Amino acid sequence: MGNEIFVNAASTTPATAGASIRISRLEKRFGSVFAVDGVDLDIAAGEFIALLGPSGSGKTTILMSVAGFEFPTSGTIQVDSEDLTYVPSNRRNLGMVFQNYTLFPHMSVLDNVAFPLKMRGLPKAERHARAEVALTTVRLGGYGNRRPNELSGGQQQRVALARAIVYQPRVLLMDEPLSALDKNLREDMQLEIKRLHAELGITVIFVTHDQSEALTMADRIAVLKDGKIKQIGPARELYERPANLFTAGFIGEMNFVDVTVESVGDVVSVGLPWGETWHLPATAAVDAVTAGEAAVMAVRPERLRLGAAAAGQVVNVTLSDIVYAGAAMLLIGRLPDGTEMRARIPGESQLSSLAPGDAASFTVPAAAILLYGGKRR
Amino acid sequence: MTKAVRSQFWHSDGRRLSGLSTMLLLLPFFAVIAFVFIYPIAQLLLISFIEPHPTLDNYARVVDNPVYARVLMRTLWTAAVVTVLSAVLGFPVAYYMSRTKGALAALVAVCVILPLWSSVLVRTAAWSFLFQRNGLINSALMALGLTSQPFKLLYTQSAVVIAMTHVLLPFMILPIYGALRSIPNDYARAAAVLGATRLRTFLEVILPLSLPGVVSGSLLVFLTALGFFITPALLGSPQEMMISTLVSKQIREVLDWPFAAALVGMLTVFVTLLAIVFSKTLRFDRLMGGAS
């Protein structure tokens, strides 16, 4: 029943089922450089997945391989268990939206949207009718006669979106589609894309270097570095319990303190640089830590509390900066060994009495502490 | 107009140049143009109307005598054929140049540009050497047994067309290359992922977007071809004169300056009309506004 209502609500265009995608041991070498270094990725039908990473992390190369613009050095790409690894782009039947819209400037908006249907041999009347429906889906009905350069950046990207879905592909690839837009438009478009994804049930691979975009939009996020997937999971998991130091530092803000592991058991004891020993619950250790070896303690700035409280560890800092940041105050302090420790405290009036140079104490709730084996680079 | 010009000139510190400084900067250029181009042309055209006495007789002679009309038509026709030939031959070269990188691309670019560094006279003389009765082309054809006696190649209209096409080819290739290079790579990729084969990507996207380059190349070649002198004079048949050879003959042999001036006047009118028609009908600037 619920399913039927959903389909009817989305009846502006016929609902398309997404395809599942399986990327296995994908490798792409340029000379001796690995752009993609053994990536395995299983994407469920209808899933919205974001590839997130700094530039040069291989996220774009993966997308280009799925689109068929690059052929991998080794590995396979399957869509609905059909091997597409070496199939040319024009026979993959995938939708794609580029960063710079790539609307053909010599065609009207309607002809742009109808272009993929023309390539598929549909008669003119039918492809124009379907293009108009697709334009209505992205809320640009009636704009068909205009030229692409007569539209704003956001409208152009919506046209590109209509053009990418008009032939009902099973997969939609997006290569930083919002990075050319300004902030407000970007947020509108994020919602627009989410809405289309829900309406069409299409599988989406979304490449971005903007972590907040990835966190808000995707069902799962793959964090990439140096051609490898460092972690893949839903936003909450990535943010609350990053699997490694790279993800911990890459997603959101994080305080790091170098420590030495003293004993391991139900309680993990760590020695802090200024001689104190803290006893942490065993769940704090994200990877296996060994007694006597170095480890890194991580804690999010918004989990810290100002002042000494009963529940948690207390650190004493010397404040070096107090920054008003709207919803919260940012307090930047130095630990006794000089390590920086940031705290984001929701605005309270007593904070206004604080000044740089003051001594203060932060409470770190035990549940907020994560422990990683090894050292920071 | 002045406003548009003024806004293009800036001090190094970011201030806009005043109107007066702009004028002073542009003055030398306009002075040269005025003295070496506008003044002599105006004098020549003036002669066609006032000598031997104020009259339109010189123009009447051009129109009345079918021989001269034929020369004018032949000139336009030759220029058109040369333009089409160089577009057909030049486009693939420009396309190849825009697709290639590295040493090979540099080599092709040098091959295109190098002929521009030698004089038209040298290149035309080289062609006359090839076209001779016992020149390279004829001896090759005979050695291969394709013909038993040499063809008449030199002093024909075909020789003129072939040599002019060769001389003018770079002026077609370079604008087309420029237009092709300015088409972002993603257009071809977008077309491909939307289902277009390579051929359709070319026909539906690349070719239309490169048309501005084809149009400017064609204008350059066509207008230059209309006034071409050395190549028709050295390789062409005296029975099939082009307008430039006719004008030269009138000035140097017949010494009929007013009539030569009238011929130049007719050509100028034709060229101006063509330029206006081109700029009015093909508004590529408007079409291309969104290409980014």
Image (tube, coloured by chain):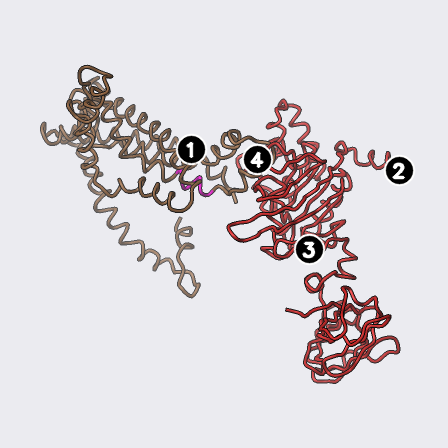
Chain colours: A red, B brown
Q: Main secondary structure of the magenta part?
A: helix
Is residue B26 shown in magenta? Answer: no
| Mark closest to the chain's N terminus, 3 or 2 | 2
Q: Quadrant of residue B104?
A: top left
- Is mark 3 in CB contact (under 8 Å) with mark 4? no
Report which residue position mark 1 lands on: B280
Q: Residue furthest right?
A: A1
| Kind of residue at disc 3 | Val
Is residue B179 shown in magenta? Answer: yes
| Kind of residue at disc 4 | Ala
Report which residue position mark 2 lands on: A2
- For label 1, the SS is helix
Q: In front of the other: label 4 or label 1? A: 4
**Magenta segment, which residues?**
B176-182
- For label 3, the SS is strand
The foreground one among A372 and A64 is A372
Looking at the image, residue B108 lies above or below residue A231: above
Q: CA distance from mark 1 to mark 3?
A: 55 Å
Percent across and percent down for residue B120 are 21, 37
What is the chain letter for disc 4? B
The foreground one among B210 and B253 is B210
Q: Residue furthest top?
A: B148
Report which residue position mark 3 lands on: A223
